[in-house]
Amino acid sequence: MPGDLLFIPGPVTCAPEVLAAMAEPMVNHRGERFAGALLAVREKLARVYETSGEVLVLGSSGTGGLEAAVVNLFSPGDLLLSCPVGNFGKRLAAIAKIHGADVEILDTEPGHGLDPARLAGRLRQDRERRIAGVLLTQNETSTGVQNDMEALARAMEGHPALRVVDSVSGLGASRMPIDGLGFDAVVGASQKVLAAPPGLAFVALSARAWDAVARAKMPRFYFDFAKAREFGADGQTPWTPPISQVFALNVALDRYHAEGTANVHARHSANAAAIRAGVQALGLQLFGDIRYASPTVVTMRVPENVQASVVLKTLRERHGIVLAGGQGDLKGKIFRMGTMGAITPADVQRAIAALGETLAAQGFASAVR
């Protein structure tokens, strides 16, 4: 039966052929068929990342990939500079703290991107080079912000800190050549731009990162990059992988590359622009600084005297359209509308119309007559 249209920041609506791949018969995860699929996935991911380095595939959500990056690169007591621009950046900082890192927060007002000048200034102050790593977010779905990663890369030039990037909701939607920009560990996940089911995280690592893996002292077992690298060379994983998700991601990556990277980028930007135009035509206010507007999620303010939870429930139950609300301090204050997955311009129009109708039922006077 047809499902809801997912306009949330992940998981996303998947194409039928991607879902069909999950119905393939189960195979031996130490056999040739799975090895061929995993090696193909790794090669196709490397092209998305624009890297000549290795990409590791992990059986986990994106959060697992972020935890893996922290524990494999750092040691307890390391000073890490965390630069959150929303809840998911704060989550990465929390992961590092739990594992014994000394975490310093360089905070940013919600809805704004990280100021490269502030980052550069803090790193210049670190004359003793105590900062071992900088934790960054490429795209923050809790606030609808995308950082200027090229500017942030320039801001870090000359400092030896490892550069760890949460690209879970950004990878593949806009260009970020990690080799050229000098990032050391960039984490992505299957259920976002690549439009596959949840269950896989991936991490692209630089040569500097692999040197750090050999030195790092944080404990790890399941998320051990050295083991993942060893088994990955033969098309295997250290532990039992989510086989069906690998098959699905392989098909999703074929779709991505058949469409073409530039076209995928343009599609997400066009979806985001159409949603922004549509909600503004309804009379809604966008949230945050438009200079940092994300191509994968659009955030808008909930109008006064409108109950966000009622709007979201009505959209889901009456129209089959799923939007997301705000998180933390923004709960009840913003709607979040994702642009990722197998959605069409007609789907966007349908969702905007349903949102307008639902808001009108709550007494909101739309600008559209």
Image: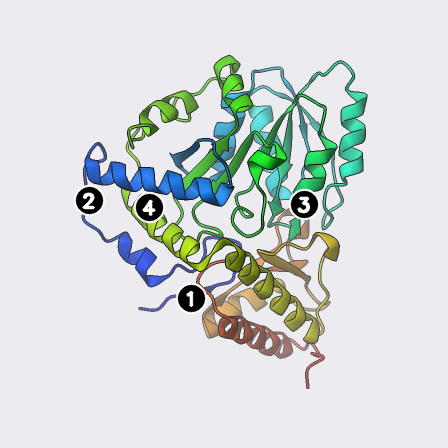
Q: Earlier in the sequence, mark 4 or mark 3?
A: 3
Q: Mark 1 or mark 3: which comes first in sequence?
A: 1
Using the rendered image of the protein, determine whether residue 242 is visible from the camera's viewpoint.
no
Q: Amino acid at mark 3?
A: Asn
Q: Which residue is mark 4?
A: 245
SS state under label 1: loop
The vertical placement of 253 against 150, above or below, is: below
Residue 49, image x and y in percent?
Answer: 50, 41
Q: How many marks?
A: 4
Residue type indicated by callout 2: Met
**Image quarter of the C terminus:** bottom right
Under circle 2, the secondary element is loop
> Please, what is the three-letter code of the amino acid marked with disc 4?
Gln
The image shows residue 335, relative to residue 69, as above or below, that is below
In the depicted structure, whether residue 369 falls above or below residue 347? below
The alpha-carbon separation of the residues under discs 4 and 3 comes to: 29 Å
* Pointer 2 or 1: first along the chain: 1
* Camera-nearest label, 4 or 1: 4
**Which label is found at residue 26?**
2
Quarter occupied by residue 275: bottom right
| Residue annotated with mark 3 | 147
Give the number of the mark in front: 2 or 1: 2
Which residue appears at 58% of the width and 48% of the height?
175
